[in-house]
Every structure is written in C-alpha cells, then in structure tokens.
Image (cartoon, rainbow, N blue to C red):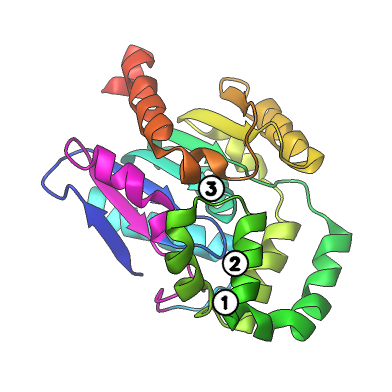
Amino acid sequence: MKIIEYGKQNREVIMLLHGGGLSWWNYRSEAELLGDRYHVVLPILDGHADSGKDFVSIEENAARIISYIDREYGGTVLLTGGLSLGAQILTEMLSQREDVCRYAIIESASVIPSRMTNALIGPTFSSSYSLIQKRWFAKMQFDYLHIRDDLFEDYFRDTAKISKRNMVSFLKASTAYAPKPGLQKCHALVRIVVGKKEPKGMLRSAQLLREMLPESIQEVKEGLFHGEFSINHPDRYAAELCEMFRTAPRNNRN
C-alpha cells in the first residue's frame, strides 16, 4: 500500500481516503493545512495509479487499511475521512472495526445499490475506456466532476494509469455497496456530509447512514455537487474538521 504523509513528527493521526478515479491529491491541500498539527496519512486506494495492488473489493481494501492502522498506529487513529469510494471504504472500516478511529467524516457515500447502473458499467467501459487517455475527453470528464482547475494535470496523469479491469472493478463495487449491520456498533463520532446538488440517490444514502448512526451529525452543503466540499473547499474542510475536535464531547478528546 502506497502512503503519502505530511506532519510525520506529530502524534495524532488523520487518515483521508480519496475518491474513486482520483488519488491522494484529492486531499493534498487539507494535508498542507493540517500537517503542522497532525500526522496526515493519505493512502492510495487499491486499483488506482501507483497503488501497487489491483482492486478486489471495498471489503478487502477496508481490511487492508485496518491492518495498516494496526501495524503502524496501534489499532486506532484520531480521525478517518473519505470521499465517494473512499467514504464507502471508510463506512466498511467502521463496520469491521468499531473503534478504528475516534472521529469520522463520510462525504458523498453511496450506500443504496443500483442494479441498473451496475449492469451498465461493463459494456460502457468496454467501448469507451480508450478515451480516458485522450486529453480532450479527460477535460470533459474533469469539468463534469466540478473539480477545481489546478488539479487537472494530476487528474489526467493518474486517471490514464488506471487499468480497465481496475476501473470496472471499483465502479461495480461502488454501485453495489450497502452498509453492514456492524456499522451500528461504531464508536466514532461520525459526520455525514453531502452536497445539496448531488443526485437524489446520494441524498437518500446520507439519510440512510444517519438512520443507522443516530448519534451522527448530518450536513447537507448548499450549492455543492458531488465531492466539492473536500476537493474545492479545502480551507473549509480543514477548519470544520478542527472545529469537530474542539466541540466534541470530552470522552472523544481523550
């Protein structure tokens, strides 16, 4: 597993899991903002550029990250955040290990399976995969995703490195994922974030997570599309993360 780290001299660990088709630079700005106070750990998810391992399943990727936390950080970290596929992996981590982190930010996680979308992924990518290495097509996709302009070169470079097999695998896993009952045993203080302009299915997913985690905090971000909070507003993300620590119940601060 390839890991990018900031603030290694700091004791408290924040781990942030990027979105599907992206990479660690999804959270680079947050890491730069938080690295003076926290040890920020940015794993590259399985199946993505330079990860060193093919994608198998959300469940396996979650288990691998938990094993890494066990080995490097004694079984738990201060906070884990995730976007989209990263948020699904985080949700699975919380299902597999109730105390893997003390705080969690689940952003734009789809947890209501879509059979139709899942069935279309294979045929769609069989005919269009070669286009991802075309700059014009990558720019069209990039603009559709509402990612800020300065990240395009990172996006184009790393998306073009993802194999068709891996891309189909993680997209199919993402559209089939549903949270496990073990999530309800989670000990973390969880914040569920979704953009107001996201598809209705994503808003319903946020509500389902809120129902499974009745002690969680749900926030619908006005004017934001999928993933825009962490990708396009890193200052707000970092500030609100720190505010989460400051206002948490005392037993979560220890």
Q: Which residues are magenta?
A: 24-52
> Mark 3 falls on what kind of element?
strand
- The image shows residue 143 at horizontal and vertical percentages of 62, 57
Relative height, residue 96 to residue 193 (above, below)? below
- Which tag, 2 or 3, sits closer to the chain's start? 3
Q: Is residue 118 above or below residue 144?
A: below
Q: Which residue is mark 2?
A: 139
Residue plotted at (71% across, 40% down)? 198
Q: Amino acid at mark 2?
A: Lys
Residue 135's disc is 1
* Residue at x 39% of width, y 76% of height: 50
- Name the residue type under label 3: Leu
Q: Alpha-carbon distance for marks 1 and 3?
A: 25 Å
Do residues under tags 1 and 2 come within 8 Å of each other at their CB atoms? yes
Left or right position of 59 against 81: right
- Residue 129 image point, x, y percent: 69, 82
Query: Which residue has dot 3 on it?
Result: 83
User: Looking at the image, which residue is at 30% across and 52% down?
Assistant: 41
Pair 2/3: label in front: 2
Residue nearer the viewer, 99 or 22: 22
Q: Quadrant of residue 76?
A: top left
- Is 26 included in the stretch rendered in magenta? yes
- The amino acid type found where label 1 is placed reads Arg
The tally of labels here is 3
- Residue 40 percent across, percent down from the top left: 27, 47
Query: Is residue 211 magenta-colored?
Result: no
Helix, strand or loop under label 1? helix
